[in-house]
Image: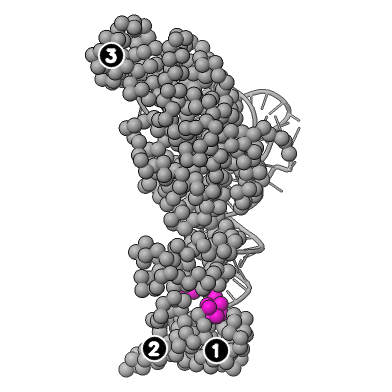
Amino acid sequence: MRTSTPARVRFAPSPTGVMHIGGLRTALYDWFLARKTGGQFILRIEDTDRNRYDPDAEWHIKESLNWLGLDLDEGPDIGGPHAPYTQSERLELYQDAAAKLIDAGDAYYDDTQSEELAALRQRQQAAGQAPGYDNRGRYRTAEQIQESRDEGLDVVVRFKVPDHGEMQIEDEVRGRLKFDLSLLQDFVILKSDGFPTYHLAHVVDDYEMGITHVIRGEEWIPSCPRHVLIQQALDIPTPKYVHVPLITAQDGAKLSKRHGAQSALEYRDAGYTPDAVLNYLALLGWSPGDDTEIMTRDEIASRFEVERILSHPAKFSAQKLEWMNQQHIMTADEDALTDMIMPCLERPEEDGGFLDEIERPIDRGIVKAMVPVLRERIKVLPDVVALIDFLFVDEVHPNPEEMIGRRMDAEMVLTSLNAGIEALEEVEPFDGESIEQALRGLTESTGLKAGQLFTPIRVAVTAKRIAPPLFESIEVLGRERTITRLRKGLEAFERHVSNRSD
RNA sequence: GCCCCGUUGGUGCAGCGGCCUAGCACGUCGGCCUUUCAAGCCGGAGAUCACGGGUUCGAAUCCCGUACGGGGUACCA
């Protein structure tokens, strides 16, 4: 294995809304790289836009990372050698950098007002020209700026972009990127409210925090030359750039609520396991180089390589995620799986949990006993609700008509139920294996086929046509309750038959 | 409009100049197994490797163009 130097990577979201799976995947790649190289994974909150600031967002971001198990080495809550990790608390740093750039002649104060800018854009568009700033503020005098300030006008700081030249940037996934600087206009680095723009703030912070790899969405590629320009002017090194492809919806468009594209926490609530989501997202834009698909987080981390990140966007497939979830559920630790299932059962009926008439808390032992047979027949955790609720209700109301399975008549139902009651009264010990033996033995004495024998019993015991395996279910239900249900089922069926013949 | 990135079956990936009569997985169809449902196993359909030119003895793989898709073009990130 090639030895790699420890990477310092940061996940730097803006607290402007819920955390989307696209952002989450970026965080994943950050984390994988950090863990693979023995480096650090850092969270930095980029709250430089006070207009879009959402106070709940930061919690949502941390909760999402936490759920996926992406542990932080440095961040707002846990601190670190470069604290604070929230940009609004580091304003001085950016203002100093801006001042330095102004002194060196790489940036200037601009008092062009937003209305003027809007009018300019409008005129350009009307004339069929490319809309953009025309660098009109470049040669303002100190006096002019002071005058504007005195009048209460807005003053920003703009970076002065060279009029000519080509910028080449090495991208770790795309190779060499080339940009024509003459197409790039002077851009704002410090807003009139004293806050920096993304361009300035992240460059300063990445340098201050010793970031080695900037992993971010490909929507940043076009503005990357700005970042390198700032670095050159500030005389600080350029980190490695890793622009990852977007995740799109089935129609190729950006993921949105419309597409069922949800935030990370919605997947949690819908019953996906963190390992499955992590595994699925990792493979959306990266692969280990062979056909391996199901992997643990440690496997992914150890096989992760930035060079193997794809350069084209991937469409999100809910179907494949479901399959992958099932795969992880099938191999998950039994206790851990049970723990994940419990809240799905205990939440209120209206939220998809057990019927409200079922008493809380739910008996974890019963659930755990069923986990081995449940795990391979659920796609998402809440699927267990409909599968095992019959174990928790006092009474069950089977539909007699459903007891008559394929190629069966009423007589067979009676035979099955009666024989079942008799056999289950005797079985010792009352466990799955013995129950199976006893019930299977009945095929000979009754002349019924296995299916004909078990269908009425299943329906009487569970009130479902589709249920978990019978013998395990009966064992967990217990002898008393099983026999009671069989008797009631028998009565109900007899009533049903006589009503029908009337 | 201009700039940037991309393009392998419906979807996610493998492929890095000959091993490709293009492999794997999801999905789909059929079968087996079977107490229901799953899981598992076996098999099928599905791709002129976006298109057109080059380079080469040889191209899905390298180069150019076109088309299409996406992104950017803010005192948003």
Relative to residue A168, is residue A291 depicted above or below?
Answer: below
The residue positioned 59% from the left and 37% from the top of the image is A40
Residue of label 3? A149
The chain to which mark 2 is attached is: A
What range is drawn magenta here?
A: A465-476
Q: Position of residue A31 (x, y in %)?
A: 57, 41
SS class, disc 3: helix
Q: For residue A16: magenta?
A: no
Tell me the number on the disc at residue A492.
Answer: 2
The chain to which mark 1 is attached is: A
Marks 1 and 3, how far apart in space? Answer: 91 Å
Amino acid on which disc 2 is placed: Ala
Label 1 vs 3, first from the N-terminus: 3
SS class, disc 1: helix
Label 1 vs 2, first from the N-terminus: 1
Residue sitting farthest toward the left: A151
Q: Position of residue A110 (x, y in %)?
A: 34, 13
Amino acid on which disc 3 is placed: Arg
Q: For residue A470: magenta?
A: yes
